[in-house]
Image (spheres, rainbow, N blue to C red):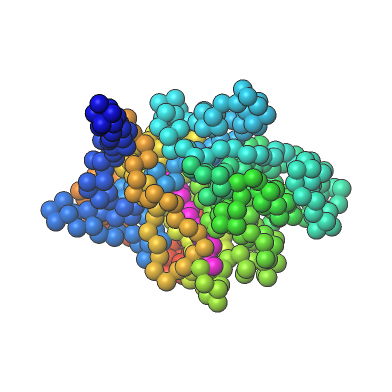
Amino acid sequence: MLRDISTILFLIVITFSALAFQQHPATAQASSEKPTPCGSYKEEETGVLKDITEDEGRVIIGQYSTRCGSYYAPYAIMAAAVYPPISAELEQNRRAGRNKVPDADVAVKALKPDNRLYAKALLRGWSYQFGSEGYTACLHDKDEAYPEDDACKRSLPGRIRRLVGSYTDFAFNVWTHRRRRASCSEVSIVFRGTTNLADYVSSGYRYTGWVADTGYHQLERNIDAIIGRIAKLNCYRNETQIVSVGHSLGAGLAELAAFAPRVGGPRIAKVFAFNPSSESGYKLVDQKRLASNAGSKDEKNSSLEIDYVYHPGEILEQERVWIPQYPIKQRCFPLVRTVRFDVSEDRGLVAQHKIGNFADGIVKTSMNARTLSAPPTVSGCDTRYRRPEGEGELVAAAPEQAIYARGVPLAKTAATSRYGFTSTYATETQIKKQEGRAFARPAALQRELDIGSTFAMTGYGG
């Protein structure tokens, strides 16, 4: 009798385990066929994957950027959420205690309602920690949670520069990523772009810095305090990597944040720059810090990685060709990659520049390739950035409606998208004319590619 009961209980446990741990049908379907990775094209006849990136993986354009959508989308959403009024809601939500709602629910309000459900799935594992808004002399004086920094106080400008700078809207948010463990795998510092006329003072810091304490100057003297507070987070470990994110002016600040940390302290591993400013602020950083943070061939896996993610036809795309942000003297230090998404449903110079529209488009186009695929590595460039865990896994169940990145039809793109750079605003009519036709790359851009530099756009108009 007891043996029969034991057998029945054993069968029940086995049956329950099989049902509980069986692979999700969508995941099973995704894993049965190896997904096409970001920056690759699969020939329909042979099934062979071909690398269609340019400059050894530094440039990804056309519809092949679609496969990168799920990788870049969370950072694009965070870059949109650092703008008001969402940034204020995130801080209010942090202080809500038991009434707190998931941070993703707040962040996705920066997107169109139709894309929010999928966007929340893409933000899985991310949570808002803290932030700061408004003019900042030294962060410790605003909030004692930041470590005190004597170097910041010594570098404070005079009263007139601080008075003019007080009208700028320097702001950032800090997010952490963890999945089923106590430690954070990644921390993201997200900087805000232009929100008012005074922020143009920051955008032109090289010319206005003598009279104003710009956002670049505020960040340069406070970046160590930001990283110091990050290091105090309960989930932070030595292996936790820090990335910086921004859009427009905020992207320029994100670059400065990566160039400026003190030597010997935690370094930022990667920059995600969306429609970035042409000003990276590197001239504010002394050469020792700059060289340490950019990386060196004498130090293994030391290179900083910077991804410029932009929308063709945005308001200042032309300056991508004309104004280099950082003069790269060594090909991999830092490693710079350019990824182009033509995905905004709202067309126009300013509309295609806005991060809300851009993030919406990246989220929507990522529904076509629902696996997580980071851009390919660049041969010979060993960066300190660690690629995400679970690459190739299904990240979310996509709705039926999905779009490909604009451009040439997928079957034709292999032959034409390699030279698909446009130098002016692309109207719908111009897009149709581009189909099936190769474009000669501007000579200035070719020279940039030859030295591994593909720096882009100045950041006006958040």
Q: In the rendered image, is residue 92 in sight?
A: no
Question: Which quadrant, please, contains the C terminus?
Answer: top right
Q: Which residue lies at the image location 54% right of the left edge and 49% below the top edge?
A: 186
Residue ranking furthest to the left: 45
Q: Position of residue 6 (x, y in %)?
A: 28, 31
The residue under the point 17% across, 54% down is 47
State the residue lying farthest toward the top.
99
**Residue nearer the viewer, 72 or 403:** 72
* Image spot of residue 25 (x, y percent): 26, 35
In the image, is residue 345 part of the stretch drawn in magenta?
no
Residue 345 coordinates in the image, percent (x, y): 39, 34
Q: Nearer the viewer, residue 364 or 161?
A: 364
Bounds of the magenta segment = 302-312
State whether residue 345 is above or below residue 161. Answer: above
**Residue 390, relative to residue 260: is it above or below?**
above
Check the picture and name the quadrant holding the N terminus.
top left
Residue situated in front as seen by the camera: 82 or 318: 82
Q: Is residue 70 visible?
A: yes
Residue found at x 79% / y 54%:
149
Farthest-out residue, right: 159
Whether 303 is among the magenta residues is yes
Where residue 16 appears, as percent x and y from the top left, is: 30, 31
Query: Eyeballing the image, is 189 above or below 117?
Result: below
